[in-house]
Amino acid sequence: TMDDMKREEQGLIIEIAKNPKDSRLYEVLGDLYVKMNNLFDAKESYEAAMELNPNNKELEKKHSKVLKKMVI
């Protein structure tokens, strides 16, 4: 449900505050935003993850998918 996703989002934001260099947390948050259809925040989260983990091809794919959805 949307409430569950909101709770998950809050939890992830708290985790990121504790571990700001963990790219995986940003990626999981980005995935959650995609599920919530919050494309702008998904894009921002993936970009933060990519800065921390620049060679992650999977991340690049997710990021470009979000960009494509935003254009449509």
Image (tube, rainbow, N blue to C red):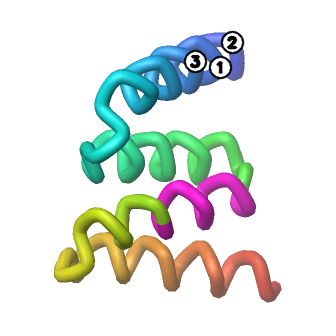
Q: Position of residue 31 (x, y in %)?
A: 46, 49
Give the residue type at disc 1. Lys
What residue would you read off at disc 2?
3
Name the secondary structure under disc 3. helix
Marks 3 and 1: CB-CB under 8 Å? yes
**Chain-order first, disc 3 or disc 2:** 2
Q: Magenta span has 40?
A: yes
- Three-letter code, disc 2: Asp
Location of residue 68 in the rendering, given as x and y in whole percent from the top left corner: 65, 86
Q: Quadrant of residue 7?
A: top right
Label 3, label 1: how far apart the Cα atoms are: 6 Å
Q: Is residue 49 above or below residue 51?
A: above
Residue found farthest to the left: 55
Please name the predominant secondary structure of the magenta segment in the image: helix
Task: Select label 3 or label 1 by which is in front.
Answer: 3
Asked whether the residues under the numbered discs 1 and 2 touch, taking CB atoms below 8 Å apart as contact, a structural biologist would say yes
Q: Which residues are magenta?
A: 39-47
Q: Is residue 29 left or right of residue 70?
A: left
Numbered circle sitting on residue 10? 3
Task: Decide if residue 10 is on the left or right side of residue 27.
Answer: right
- The residue type indicated by label 3 comes to Gln
Q: Which residue is more in the foreground, 14 or 41?
A: 14
